[in-house]
Image: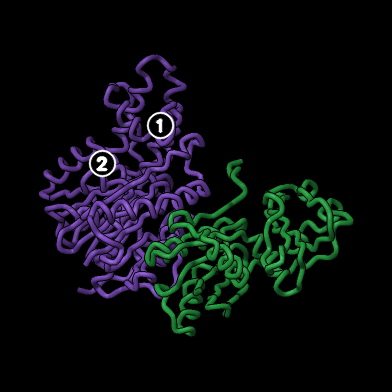
Chain colours: A purple, B green
Amino acid sequence: MRVLGLETSCDETGVAIYDSDNGSLSHALYSQRVHAQYGGVVPELASRDHVLKTLPLIKTVLSESRLKARDIHGIAYTAGPGLIGALLVGASIGRSLAYALNVPAVAVHHMEGHLLAPMLEEHPPALPFIALLVSGGHTQLVRVDGVGSYEMLGESVDDAAGEALDKTAKLLGLGFPGGARLAELAMSGRTDRFRFPRPMTDRPGLDFSFSGLKTYAINTLKEAGDQPGTRADIARAFMDAVIDTLAIKCRRAIQQTGLRTLVAAGGVSANHELRVRLDKVAKEMGAMVYYPRLEFCTDNGAMIAYAGYRRLAAGMSEPLAFGAQPRWPMESLRPITE
Amino acid sequence: MKLLAIDTSTDACSAALYIDGDIKELWELAPRRHAELILSMIDRLCQDAGVGVRSLDGLAFGRGPGAFTGLRIGAGVIQGIAFGTNLPVVPVSSLAALAQGAMREANRENVLSALDARLGEVYWGAYACRGNGIMRGVLAECACLPSEVPLPGHGRWFGVGNGWQVYGEPLRLRVGALISGVDPGRTPRAHDVALLGVDALSRGEGVSAEEALPVYLRDQVVR
């Protein structure tokens, strides 16, 4: 079965084709640049860009796979969570294209896409596992017993880790979205100059809180004065706090659930230092960590095509209508039965 | 000729199927329910007529101006169907469709279309019939203050669209003696999108799926 996947939940248009016999055949991504000048994603501009880019990207992946639209057996589109107007672009094109091709369509939960992304790798994780979903929109620890069978173990009570990275980067003058630049700047910072708190690690539980760290960063900059190197040292302390906190909670989740398989996915899971740290935690705990390849950490169509394939293969499909759910609890998803 | 038309540019949602001069239309006032309704409307029309979307000759949609989300739902649906069928698409002005409706149902030959654009503005256009029953624009469409709408040179004009309700007073002040009457209750309808679409398609004016894009008229969306 070949499934076309469309991802338009935020500021990236992602399109891909997954083939159940041959894996991911082709994927294409367009990262919107229009938002940088506004210091954050402007929903209306995101929607306008998606409606320009989705079909051209579909054409790209079809031609790269040497396929015609008629060779597609099903279509998956992200229906939430995310920006409603942006989601509706992928949903309208995806559902209607499926109608015209007379194939089934399925609405996919964006975070289910992320947590299944490591399944596209050569050595996929075995169920059940713990998933650390860490991106610009989410920071969650989820127990995964099967596709669609999720239990939220903990999540951020305020900013997502990636969001805190981007906001702090902006405060340090690194532009938007500057999370990756902040991580890079941290590489040249001193580890012994500042120490930031590890939020919510001093109490039991698996929830996160990252919004205080950006305030801590800006206050530190004010107090220390803006000498050369100070911003890099702050970036270092900030990254250490985020990575440490994520690692502490992952260790706790492994202890609490008794599961020995951890999946880390989402944009922040591409961070090399985080991966090194999680690998270390896993080794100490006798566990294994699985990651998506770097290009499938950020939003992409391949993970949506794959999640859609799993649901279509289980016989699920949408009626002749579409919609979007800006807020959509993962626990409300229908588990697939195999 | 067989053509499918839709309009989702306002609170109304409609689809129409034109087959060799005969038009069937489904219409519903359905704020924020376009995504839920439009495909089943299309499918019902096709089933009733016993045709599949693949056997059509073209598609048309109300490309705007109008509510942004609705415009993208319409464009997205048409992009998907056009790409899957390789059919040509006619993007039709929703203001022109509004005028075409006034021509079709009330024989208005000179029409000033005004849709509420929020933020104190109207989407505005002027249309006149040139003999074959098809309305054509006589001014460039725009989003502007009711007190500054561009005016056609002369003649008697009939006003349609909810802009005449929301900004009735300033529009009448601006248009003055040119106006012969108003019908603010009209919305753009797929029936008229179909008529304008058939006319354009017969002149070879269809575009490809990826050119089926909304026309917002308002590009300043960040305040």
Q: Check disc 2 and report the residue beneath it.
A: A270
Image x and y of residue A317, in percent: 33, 73
For image coordinates 75% across by 59% down, the residue present is B112
Crowd rating for badge 2 (residues with CA inside 10 Å; few <14, some 14–19, many 20+): many
Q: Which mark is residue A303?
A: none
Q: Considering only vertical position in the picture, is B222 above or below B1?
A: above
Left or right position of A23 against A33 = left
Query: Residue at horizontal 26%, vertical 38%?
Result: A271
Q: Residue at x 68, y 68 (%)?
A: B132
**Residue at left offset 33%, top offset 47%:** A29
Quarter holding the N terminus of chain A? bottom left
The chain identifier of the residue carrying mark 1 reads A
Q: Is residue A205 visible?
A: no
Seen in the image, is A134 located left or right of residue A119?
right
Mark positioned earlier in the residue sequence (1 or 2): 1
Q: Give the chain of mark 2.
A: A
Q: Is residue A233 visible?
A: yes
Q: Nearer the viewer, residue B148 or A146?
A: B148
Amino acid type for the residue under numbered disc 2? Ala
The C terminus of chain A lies in quadrant:
bottom left
Report the front residue among A259 and B175: B175
Q: Residue furthest right?
A: B177
Mark 1 and mark 2 on one chain: yes
Specify few, some or many for label 1: CA neighbours under 10 Å numbering under 14, 14-19, or 20 or more. Answer: many
Residue picked out by circle 1: A169
Q: Tell me the SS state at disc 1.
A: helix
